[in-house]
Image: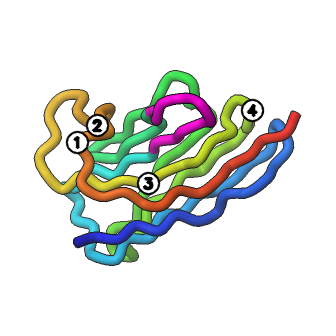
Amino acid sequence: QVQLVESGGGLVQAGGSLRLSCAASGHIFSSYTMGWFRQAPGKEREFVAASERTTYYADFVKGRFTISRDNAKNMVYLQMNSLKPEDTAVYYCAIGMGQFYGRTYLVSGAYDYWGQGTQVTVSS
């Protein structure tokens, strides 16, 4: 079983930046899909970014957020720049250990393990 622990959330003003970190208890193989999702109050969990051999982003974060990973350190990061109030949510890290095909990275149910989440609040 893999445990994921997110950190780096907090309160930031609009236009500011935060860097979220996700630490995995086990080794992250390069073949694993690492994803970031978020959930705002009263809304469903939504895809933010994923890292496989390439990276993928939701349209609403393209050009502002960057996902990266350090497999040797079992870490995944989400650099968030130009934050907006609508980015306010709990952000979750997830790991998919199976074979992902096509756009499976978009599907939260395809991931095997999740972190507990970290709150990001962007004030206007």
Label 4 with label 2: CB-CB less than 8 Å = no
Image position of 35 (left or right of 98): right
Q: Going from the N terminus, do you reach mark 1 or mark 2 first?
A: 2
Give neighbour class at mark 2: few <14, some 14-19, many 20+ (Cα, 10 Å): many
Q: Between residue 57 and residue 13, name the one nearer to us.
A: 13
Image position of 97 (left or right of 69): left
Task: Say what secondary structure mark 4 lies in.
Answer: loop
Res. 105 mark: 2
Give neighbour class at mark 4: few <14, some 14-19, many 20+ (Cα, 10 Å): some
Q: Main secondary structure of the magenta part?
A: loop
Q: Going from the N terminus, do you reach mark 1 or mark 4 first?
A: 4
Res. 110 mark: 1
- Label 3 sits on what residue type? Cys
Q: Distance of mark 1 from mark 4, alpha carbons?
A: 28 Å
Q: Going from the N terminus, do you reach mark 4 or mark 3 first?
A: 4
Task: Say what secondary structure mark 3 lies in.
Answer: strand
> Where 24 sits versus 32, above or below?
below
Query: Which residues, given as a range, are shown in magenta?
Result: 37-46
- Label 4 sits on what residue type? Lys
Res. 93 mark: 3
Q: Distance of mark 4 from mark 2, alpha carbons?
A: 24 Å
| Residue 55 drawn at (x, y percent) | 37, 40
